[in-house]
Amino acid sequence: MTGHVQAVKSWLGQVLDGGASASGSLAYRNNRKAIWRGDIPEKYARLVDLVPGQRVMELGAAEGVLSLLLAQKKEKVFALELKGERHEEAQRLKASWQDRGLDVGRCEMVLGNIKQQLHLLRAVDTLLAVRSIYYLRTDLAGVFDAVSRHVPNVVLCGNRNRARKYVESHGNPDDPLGKNNYFATLEGMTSLLEGCGYAIVNSIAEGDPIVIGAKRISPAN
Ligand SMILES: C[S@@+](CC[C@H](N)C(=O)[O-])C[C@H]1O[C@@H](n2cnc3c(N)ncnc32)[C@H](O)[C@@H]1O
């Protein structure tokens, strides 16, 4: 692929994800001051009470807002993020919330790629991924094979823009161009989880779609 085509694809991905960029998602940048004060946009707040379990790993945690919210109610939250600058912003946000007296000490910001962090799956009972699984592309099946062996609860939140794009352009999960956006749709996330042996315990079609799966994990795993 030429550099130009790659740049256009990257720009398109950023637009579909609501303006995600090296300096943070649009939702974060537009609300940064409010978030630092503890005034949380609905995008994150709507998910907090839906997340089961006491030990959570958030895949693609970006600036850590959702993980920090959850950590105040959970035993442990790992906020895993691939990009250094987002991870660093997440650490700054955590420190600022701690200065304000918020109980976010149980949130651990982890810099890395899920592919090298699969061992963390053994330490949690819930995997949470918001607008992130479609970035895994050819690694998706392998990562979810590991998730399904170790993690009893999975919360997936997709992306309404990518879901619309998927329906408009292809609507065929076997089409290479539509494949990644399929996993931003309710149908794609449901099929991924059911294919890994999860029962769907909750599913919300409005806004960014949300699918929650649960399965019994054998202690031998
Ligand atoms: C579109 S952003 C969504 C961020 C955040 N969850 C939200 O909804 O605002 C996707 C995030 O996933 C991260 N990511 C992508 N692939 C990853 C991987 N293999 N391991 C860890 N994080 C990853 C990206 O760096 C990016 O911050």
Image (tube, rainbow, N blue to C red):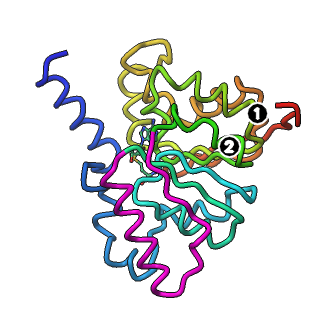
Residue 18, disc? none
146 vs 160: above or below: above
Of all residues, the one furthest to the bottom in this rendering is 100
**Residue 153, percent from left and from top:** 73, 45
Element under label 2? strand
Q: Are marks 1 and 2 in contact (CB under 8 Å)?
A: yes
* Residue 93 part of the magenta-drawn span: yes
23 vs 131: above or below: below
| In this picture, residue 105 sits left or right of residue 35 | right
User: Which residue is tagged 1?
Assistant: 198
User: Which residue is tagged 2?
Assistant: 154
Give the mark, 1 or 2, whose residue is nearer the N terminus.
2
Q: Quadrant of residue 209?
A: top right
Element under label 1? loop
Magenta region: 83-112
Q: Is mark 2 within 8 Å of ligand 1?
A: no
Q: Nearer the viewer, residue 205 or 91?
A: 91
Q: Quadrant of residue 190?
A: top right
Ligand 1 placement by image quarter: top left
| In this picture, residue 72 sits left or right of residue 81 | right
| In this picture, residue 29 sits left or right of residue 93 | left
Q: Hey, what amino acid is under mark 2?
A: Val
177 vs 16: above or below: above
Query: Residue at the spot x=46%, y=30% of the render?
Result: 136
Q: Quadrant of the N terminus?
A: top left
